[in-house]
Image (cartoon, coloured by chain):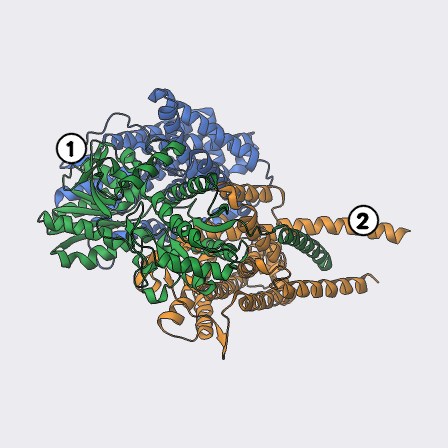
Amino acid sequence: MQNHLKWVVAIALITALVAVGGMSCTSEEEEMETYKVGAVFSLTGPASHLGVPEGQTVKMIVDQINANGGINGHPLEVIIYDTETSAEKCATMVTRLIEQDNVLAIIGPTTSGNSLAIIDMVTAAEIPNISCAASTLIVQPVEERYWVFKTPQTDKQAVTEIYIYLEAQGITEIAIITDTSGFGAAGRDILIADAADYGITILDDQNFTSGDTSMQSQLTHIRGTNPEAIVCWATDKESAIVAVDMQTLQMDTPLFCSHGIANMGFITGAGDAANGVIFPAGKLLIVGNVPASDPQKEVLTQYKADFEALYGEGTVNTFGGHAWDALNFVIIALEEMEEGLDTAEARAFIRDEIEQIEGFVGISGVFTMSPADHLGMMPGSLAMIEIVDGEWTWLQ
Amino acid sequence: MSADQFVQYLISGLTQGSIYALVGLGFTIIYAVTRIINFAQGEFVMLGGMLSFTLAISAGLHLVPALLLSVLIATAMGAIMYLLAIRTAKRASAVSLIILTIGAAIFIRGIAGELWGVDFVRPPFFTGRESISFLGAYIHPQALWIIGTTIVVTILLHLFLSYTMVGKALKACAISPRAAGLVGIDAKAMALIAFAIAAALGAIGGVVMAPLTLTAYNVGVMLGLKGFVAASIGGFKNPLATVAGGIVLGIVESLAVGVDWGPFTSSYKDAIALVVLLLILILRSGRLAAEERES
Amino acid sequence: MLAKIKSKWTYLAIAALLVFLILVPFDWFLGQYKGLAIFIGISTMVTVGLCLLMGYTGQVSLGQAAFYGLGAYFSAVLSKTYDVNPWLAMLIAAIATGGFAYVIGYPIFRLRGNYLAMATLGLGLIMWILFRQLSQFTGGPDGMAGIPYLSIGSFVFDTSFKRYFLVWFFCLAILLISQNIVQSRTGRALRAIHGSEAAAESIGINVAQFKVKIFVLSAVYASLAGSLFVHHLRFVSPQPFDFLASVKLVVMAVIGGLASVWGAIFGAGTTRILSDELLLSFGEWDIAIYGLILMLVMIFTPEGLFVKLKDVFGRLRLRHSERGAES
């Protein structure tokens, strides 16, 4: 019997592990000088086209800050980990940021699911967390979200914009078609819950799954119920397929989409089927049309210019903007922070500072936080946008 | 549902079914000749589409050479996969081979994700996008290409298998690998050819469907699964059965959305394929077990 | 003489392993990795079941994450929504998951090879779809949070430190039980089946029954792991139970060695360390690397990487002791 030998092997490997572990333990001499912030984004997985621009934005800001001498002389370092859009991976990475990397704050995650998964964790560790995800539940009930903030508009705000518009147009009967993913399902729940408040009846409720290649059957079913408008809640790829299928089926019912299509991918994917689609999004997409009197104009223009200088023309999107806002919250807090605080005190300080943010002009909107509101987005932050000739135009 | 709607469900289902059929053909060929389930089949479909985008748009080639080259490259990769991975795993068990092809699938997907990034792409339509009216329903011109390609490929494949030496040799392997060996057919060469053909079939499917379905590095999983179900409906026997299986699946999925019954909502549409798969496996388990024991 | 040396080595090795495990979560040792260590322990529990299943029945399960998920969701829903005592919930989850495995085990094991694999794949996917769709119970694709901690009386497992010991207690218990099974009559029957089913049948072993038993056992292990998982994260969602998760489990089993019990630690450990530590900044490459590892291991060491390493060391040692005996 060779039982003992596997033990020897195991021990040897374990010893090797210890050696490596021990080495990395001691070699990580912490620079009390550098301000370390953690970030978890979906760099891979289904939400990667949201997470990648978030990561890119963060890198851009860090380079800019450090080129200008850091924050009060302290270099800024943001450690970015990939959550693979997986709650488990996200939790692992967050634990790592808290326990191994000793960061002062955590921005992200990208998706609502991931954000909800780590709320207990960041609360127990008493570290401020600024999420870049949509769900309202991330910051509510606010009594249980002492350490958690978020920057993107909620799904509810986006749905509200659409419903207000529909009501103004006198549209009362609609059909909805949504993705079964977290984003789509959350949107669907709100669409159904809030419809009556705007005098809207939902005639048909169809679903599809990410990765589906045709929504023609669902649309054919919807067509049979004769709605005045169709609201589609999904990310850009599936929404593009919906738009193309509608065009193929020669359905001229007006199509409204979610803020998930707020990037060029939707337009290239749907081609001319994208024209006429209306959706709510941050003003970043139509920054050209934003009047100079709007407080966001300058910030938006600057971000677009900086981002596209680094990553190419037409690449800027609102998702990166959420990360811009989140990191800037932390930077504002760090700028006010005094020297010599230990990690726990620094984290508490940053949290308090963020909660006191007032009138901060960000990319996603203008923010005023308070103990009762950890999103703090002022109304008017979202714009209704129509795609005309492959370009975004502001519907006012 | 109205008559118009019914026709539309059929046509949409036929298009989707043709997509599944094209993917399934590759599974059938490899399984019939080598008894291996190639989990990487969906990835060849993905590669076809992604390559056609890169060649036609990024490299600016004309459409036809871009499509041909995409298929050729994918075919080569299929052959390479067989030579490097499968053939080197001498006398591996069925279980090992399954895991091996899964590994290959994941490997290809990962590389694709790095090379092409995570965003989806749309290769150009072959003949424009004006939808065509037909019997009260509508069909996209690209869908006609998909259906047409499926028909042509199936016919060509049938002719190849029945009337050429190589084709007949492949068929012999499908009927009985041992007997084929006895009459001097080189099993390894046949396996290589099967893999190459399967990769080509997958890539052809990918190339023709990508403009309509939009493609990205991760479309292989879903397509592979549906294609596999199509092949299993057809019993992994011959191309015609596979195509029939694919079309049946596509139409059933489509009609299921149209029929309003009970708790079934369109969110369960994808579960249909899985349920069909399990039913087939359970119902045919006796015969399948005998087949496995023979090989 | 050789026998005495063997047992001395074994006890020493076990003792060393235990000491190591006990010391890990302390901050002055490897405490910063205790989160990782907890996940390794949980993964090991599922992997052992899979190793036994694949090793002794010769069949692959591509849906093992389904059982992991069932345990997780049962525990989550019962303890959160219905206020059931978490320990009781864990027990119910294990029984329910095991029962489910028993019911589908017989029809599934009438299939072989490829078809069995596809059946398990289909099963895993259907469970995943159900986890996502039955949102009234499961919280849908975004899952549900606020799952209570496990506790014994007034002692609550509310820190990673405490949960580390809980998880590894279960993990070691399962490993020891499995070791016992392997060395018992059941184990011999299983090895007979592994060698040749026809031969095993002929000496009166009910092959189908044993296969289902192992299947049920692996399901119960996975269920327990799933329960511990949700009481650690206090959150459950369908994501950790998709097809890729099942594939990763197969990777762990394959590296650990099919039919190897303690190799599961090795398999789970190396895979986790690889994905959570070493491949962090690799983007999509990490999927490609899993694929590559799977391929290489299956081509060169299909009986499992760890098992192969064991053999290699074994042969070296034998040669060494032969030389020693000669002189």
Helix, strand or loop at disc 1? Answer: strand
Residue A76 seen in this snapshot: yes
Q: Quadrant of the N terminus of chain A?
A: bottom right
Q: Nearer the viewer, residue A257 or B213?
A: A257
Judge if badges 1 and 2 mark residues of a common chain.
Answer: no
Residue B35 seen in this snapshot: no
The three-letter amino acid code for the residue at tag 2 is Arg
Q: Colour of chain C?
A: orange
Q: Is residue A121 above or below residue B181?
A: below
Q: Which residue is mark 2?
A: C319
Q: For the residue carrying disc 2, how many other residues have a C-alpha within 10 Å: few (<14), some (14-19), or many (20+)?
A: few
- Please indicate whether residue A275 sits to the left or right of residue C4 in the image: left
Helix, strand or loop at disc 2? Answer: helix
The three-letter amino acid code for the residue at tag 1 is Ser
Separation of residues labelled 1 and 2 (CA atoms): 79 Å
Residue C207 horizontal/vertical position (percent): 55, 61
The reply to whether the C-beta atoms of the residues labelled 1 and 2 are less than 8 Å apart is: no
Residue lying farthest to the right in this orientation:
C327
* Label 1: chain letter: B
Q: Colour of chain B?
A: blue
Q: Nearer the viewer, residue C238 or A156?
A: A156
Q: Quadrant of the C terminus of chain A?
A: top left
Residue A311 horizontal/vertical position (percent): 39, 33
* Label 2: chain letter: C
Q: Nearer the viewer, residue B100 or C168?
A: C168
Q: For the residue carrying disc 1, how many other residues have a C-alpha within 10 Å: few (<14), some (14-19), or many (20+)?
A: few
Residue lying farthest to the left in this orientation:
A170
Q: Colour of chain A?
A: green
- Please indicate whether residue A244 sits to the left or right of residue B39 in the image: left
Q: Which residue is mark 1?
A: B133
User: Which mark is on residue C87?
Assistant: none
Q: Is residue A15 above or below residue A291?
A: below
